[in-house]
Image (tube, helix red, strand yellow):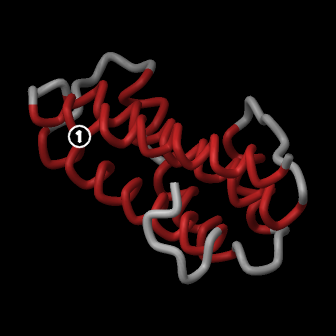
Amino acid sequence: MSRAVIELNLNLAKQFLATASWAHSQGFHNASHTNAVNAAIRAKNAVATQLAGESRRLIAHGRAVDELANLPGAEELSKALNRIFQDKNRFEYGDELATSVRSAEQLARAERFVQKAQSLCFPGQPGQI
């Protein structure tokens, strides 16, 4: 069951990335930013399932960062996830529009995060999903 959950979460992460990329290309930068965050969250769930056998579904995103920080081998991902979350509330719930540059940066961070999660979950198997 764990492998199926890992694959599901990575697949969903890639769907969120594709949506973030499309939104960015259309000038929907806040939507791109939000979908990039969701991609990272799904990838975090895959990593936690791989390393701990389960992922805690956490409403407080800081706790998701802590969850990764406490898993051996996921410290780097924890720091990357923390960076992804830094502007989340500002562009998802606030009254500020994300710029094209901010959107592109967030999308790139999420892409790297998902790639690292993929490599950690399925080492030596690029494009596993």
Number of numbered discs on residues: 1
Q: Residue 29's quadrant in the figure?
A: top left
x and y percent of residue 44 in the render?
65, 52
From the viewer's perspective, is residue 30 above or below residue 58?
above
Q: Is residue 102 left or right of residue 45?
A: left
| Residue at x 10% of width, y 35% of height | 25
Q: Which residue is mark 1?
A: 21
Q: Position of residue 4 (x, y in %)?
A: 74, 46
Q: Residue at x 40, y 33 (%)?
A: 35
Q: Is residue 101 left or right of residue 45?
A: left
Disc 1 packing (10 Å; few <14; some 14–19; many ≥20): many
Q: Is residue 92 left or right of residue 28?
A: right
Query: Where does residue 118 sit, x and y in percent of width and height?
Result: 55, 65
Residue 28 versus residue 87 in the image, above or below: above
Residue lying at the far right of the rendered structure: 53
Q: Look at the numbered disc 1 and give the secondary structure of its residue.
A: helix
In the image, 124 versus 20, the foreground residue is: 124
Residue at image point 23% right, 42% down = 103
Q: Is residue 20 above or below residue 93?
A: below
Mark 1: which amino acid?
Answer: Ser
Q: Nearer the viewer, residue 101 or 38?
A: 38
What residue is shown at x 23% (from left), y 40% (from top)?
21
Q: Is residue 86 left or right of residue 8?
A: left
Q: Position of residue 114 (x, y in %)?
A: 48, 58
